[in-house]
Image (tube, rainbow, N blue to C red):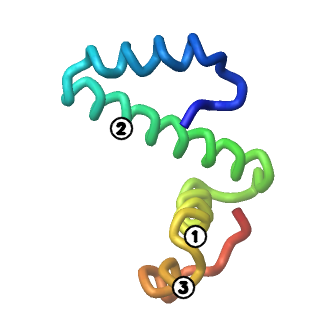
C-alpha cells in the first residue's frame, strides 16, 4: 500500500530498494522502525505528562500498546496512567 504523500515513482523505487536488500537487512530495518516508533511515543507521553517518571512513561506506553485489559492482566497492581 502506497503512502498518500509518496508519488507512484518514488513508491516503486522504494519497493525495488527493499527487494534488493537481503532478509537480514529488511528485518533490521523493521526493528529500527519499531524502536523509532517506541521512542516517538515515549517522547509524546513525556511531553503530555512531564511529571511522569521513566517507569510511569513505560507503563503508559505499555497501556497504549496493549490496551487496558491486557495491561491490567500483565500488571494488575499498576495504575492506569493516561498515555
Identify the mark at residue 69; answer none if there is no mark.
Answer: 3
Label 2 to label 1, Cα distance in Å? 21 Å
Quadrant in which residue 26 is drawn: top left
Q: Residue at x 35, y 21 (%)?
A: 18
Decide: marks 3, 1 in contact (CB < 8 A)? no
Q: Residue at x 68, y 72 (%)?
A: 81
Task: Classify 80 as above or below 64.
Answer: below
Decide: marks 2, 1 in contact (CB < 8 A)? no
N-term mark: 2 or 1: 2
* Label 3 secondary element: helix
Task: Classify 56 as above or below 54.
Answer: below
Residue indicated by mark 1: 63
Residue 31 location (% of width, % of height):
35, 38
Identify the mark at residue 31; answer none if there is no mark.
Answer: 2
82 or 22: nearer the viewer = 22
Residue 9 location (% of width, % of height):
57, 11
Q: In which quarter of the image is the N terminus?
A: top right
Amino acid at each position: 500500500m502506497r503512502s498518500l504523500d509518496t508519488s507512484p515513482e518514488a513508491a516503486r523505487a522504494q519497493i525495488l530498494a527493499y527487494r534488493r536488500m537481503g532478509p537480514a537487512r529488511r528485518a533490521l530495518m523493521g526493528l529500527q522502525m519499531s524502536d523509532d516508533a517506541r521512542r516517538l511515543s515515549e517522547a509524546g507521553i513525556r511531553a503530555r505528562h512531564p511529571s511522569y517518571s521513566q517507569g510511569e512513561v513505560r507503563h503508559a506506553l505499555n497501556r497504549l500498546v496493549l490496551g487496558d485489559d491486557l495491561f491490567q492482566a500483565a500488571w494488575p497492581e499498576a495504575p492506569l496512567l493516561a498515555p
